[in-house]
Amino acid sequence: MDEVQMNEVKRALQQAATILAQSKRATAFCGAGVSAESEIATFRDPGGLWDKMDPTEVGTAQGLMHAILNKTDELIPIFEDLLDTFEKADRNPGHDALKALEDLGILQTVITQNVDNLHWEAGNREVIEMHGNLFRMRCLACGIKQNVERKQFVRTLRKKLKSLTDYSPESLLEMAPICEACGSYMRPDVVLFGEAVHDLPRSFNTAAQCDAMLVLGTSGTVYPAALLPLEAKKAGARIIVINPREDAFRDLSDVYIPQKSGEALPSILEFIENIST
Ligand code: OAD
Ligand code: ZN
């Protein structure tokens, strides 16, 4: 980045800070890019999950079950990688800045497409997880939901996986958590393709009522979540897009910051703190 571009970015960061400092009802709309600096690969960047697996094949519940049973040898190393990722990952400065913005009374809600639990771990209190949470289990029979402690759960899964003597369907089923209420199998409470997103009305209402929206680290390719920035814009909110690469929301943005969210958000926070002192 040359000096002219760096000055442009600095101006954009300051503009974002000015908008947010005046805001009382900001919303952050997050995608996988927000967790990229937590070493969780995004879906569509090179090396991302959809590089290793075909979402049209394994993205649905049925497709995933079919792949688990029929392409077990291919999936086990990917599953082991995911266990590694989620055992090591921690919240990053981007998550922390969102928590600080909430504490300042600026950010009202985080709407996230991420399933990694990191917004809760950063301490945000209003988090809408449109695509669910990998670390909340849902009983397939009675529907009860139960949170699990992320790292401990991952370690337990790894132990179970190691102890399997074969990958027969019966053995693989031993990996699934059991519902304490009714004894049935549980699955992660995440949204697969073809399943309804969570909290749709609440997400749209929040977008329509916010006065500023931070659009962070999302490619905007998965609907209906990708409609939220448009909903906010239509209702008059100012749109701040943070994404190191140009993306679907660039045209919609009042301010575009071509940086990583873990870099840009702490800088914006610093500018806001300077404005208010
Ligand atoms: P994608 O993988 O589609 O997009 C990630 C975006 O993050 C891209 O626009 C990158 O340029 C950007 N990015 C990468 N590193 C970044 C960083 N450090 N800071 C900021 N931005 C960065 O992920 P999503 O848009 O979240 O759905 O994908 C949406 C949905 O597609 C996911 O929730 C998932 C997936 O299929 C379901 O599982 C239902
Ligand atoms: Zn149950």
Image (cartoon, grey):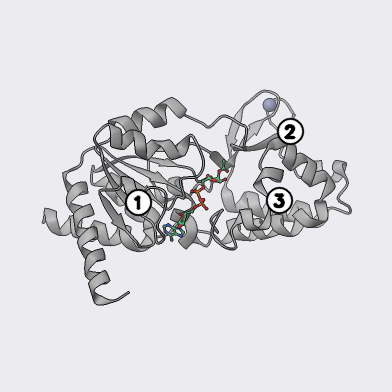
- Nearer the observer, disc 1 or disc 3? 1
Q: Earlier in the sequence, mark 2 or mark 3?
A: 3
Under mark 2, the amino acid is Tyr
Report the residue that reaches farthest toward the left: 277
Sort mark 3 into few (<14), some (14-19) or many (20+) by Cα contacts within 10 Å. Answer: some
- The residue labelled by disc 1 is 250
- Element on which disc 3 rests: helix
Q: Quadrant of residue 194?
A: top right
Q: Is residue 54 left or right of residue 131?
A: right
Q: Is residue 213 above or below residue 250?
A: above
Q: Assess mark 1: CB under 8 A from ligand 1? A: no
Res 226 quadrant in image: top left
Q: Residue lying furthest bottom in this view?
A: 2
Q: Disc 1 marks which amino acid?
A: Arg
Image coordinates of residue 86 in percent, x first then y, are 59, 56
Q: Which residue is mark 3?
A: 157
The C terminus sits in image quarter: bottom left
Q: Residue at x 36, y 63 (%)?
A: 259
Q: Which residue is mark 2?
A: 185
- For marks 1 and 3 on the same chain, the one whose residue lies earlier in the sequence: 3
**Image position, residue 61 (x, y; %):** 70, 36
Picture residue at 78% right of the left edge, 45% below the top: 67
Which quarter shows the N terminus? Answer: bottom left
